[in-house]
Amino acid sequence: EIDMVMKQVDGVVVRKSIVVRPADIDLLWEAEGYTPAFYRGKTLHTEGGAVRVIAMPQMTDKNGRKISPSNLIYKWWQDDEFSRDDSGFGKNVFNFQKRRALLYFSEIKVEASSIDESSVGEKSLVLSSKPPSLVLYENNPLYGLLSNTALESVNLVGSEITIEMVPFFASVSKRMDGRLRFSWEINDSPTGDAVPAITLRKPESGAGISNIRAGVSHQDYWEQSVEKNISITFGETR
């Protein structure tokens, strides 16, 4: 509470009290997308993917008591567009998908207020998006998927190697979702293998370098198409 005292030129004293109620809101976001079991990081927001934004307000009423987040009124905006369906009493969660093509960010804003509007707070955040990240790993017949080392190039020492693609953050819950389209090319020639793994074998004779291109796309979101290129060396090259 702030007290102000003003004395006018005629000697009249005017007093005014102002009650300041701090209102702060934390915004947390969770993106929906595929990550393998070994991944321990945050799922990133991809183009077209769904995101869940959670408002966590710290607000007090006119008596200084903390107001439960479930007892507040929320108003949500996405890119300056008011979302009536997601706004209302106790609605501190906002679910959305990016709606604007060729715009790689979205601004989310929320206003939270008490029923009597004695306490009001506002917060916004900007979410940027990107294509999924396509990572290639060796699938070893003895040790399984060697997820500790991403492949950038391969020196084929043995007779063959199985390479497997993992589309981090694609808008699916499992890698074998039918909406994902996998493709492989060797030296710019499609192999026809529409699966996430391919086995490459060393020629019986000769040596050289082959360029491998792995690709994955999502049938519902063209923005989630991504490719990865690596080289594979076999035999002794000079």
Image: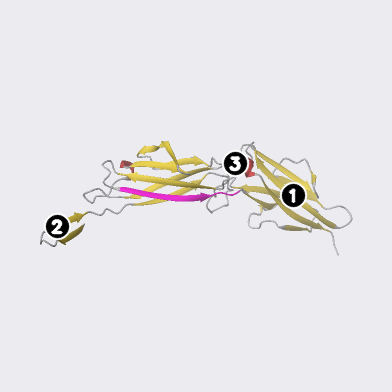
The residue singled out by tag 2 in the image is 14
Q: Amino acid at mark 3?
A: Lys
Q: Is residue 127 magenta?
A: yes
Quarter-of-image position of residue 233: bottom right
Q: Residues within 10 Å of mark 1 (few under 14, many from 20)?
A: some
- Expressed as whole percent of the image width and height from the top left, the position of residue 16 reads 17, 55
Residue closest to the eye, 117 or 160:
117
Q: Earlier in the sequence, mark 1 or mark 3?
A: 3
* Residue beneath disc 3: 174
Viewer-proximal residue among 234 and 100:
100
Tell me which segment is drawn in magenta. Answer: 120-130
Image spot of residue 66 (x, y percent):
27, 49
Specify which label sits upstream in the sequence, 2 or 1. Answer: 2
Q: CA distance from mark 3 to mark 2?
A: 69 Å
State how far apart marks 2 and 1 are (Cα).
78 Å
Q: Quadrant of the C terminus?
A: bottom right
Along the viewing direction, whichever of 93 and 148 lies nearer the viewer: 93
Q: Point out the residue furthest to the right here.
A: 205
Q: Which residue bears the numbered disc 1?
A: 213
Separation (CA) of disc 1 from disc 3: 22 Å
Dot 2: within a 10 Å radius of its alpha carbon, few (fewer than 14), some, or many (20 or more) residues?
few
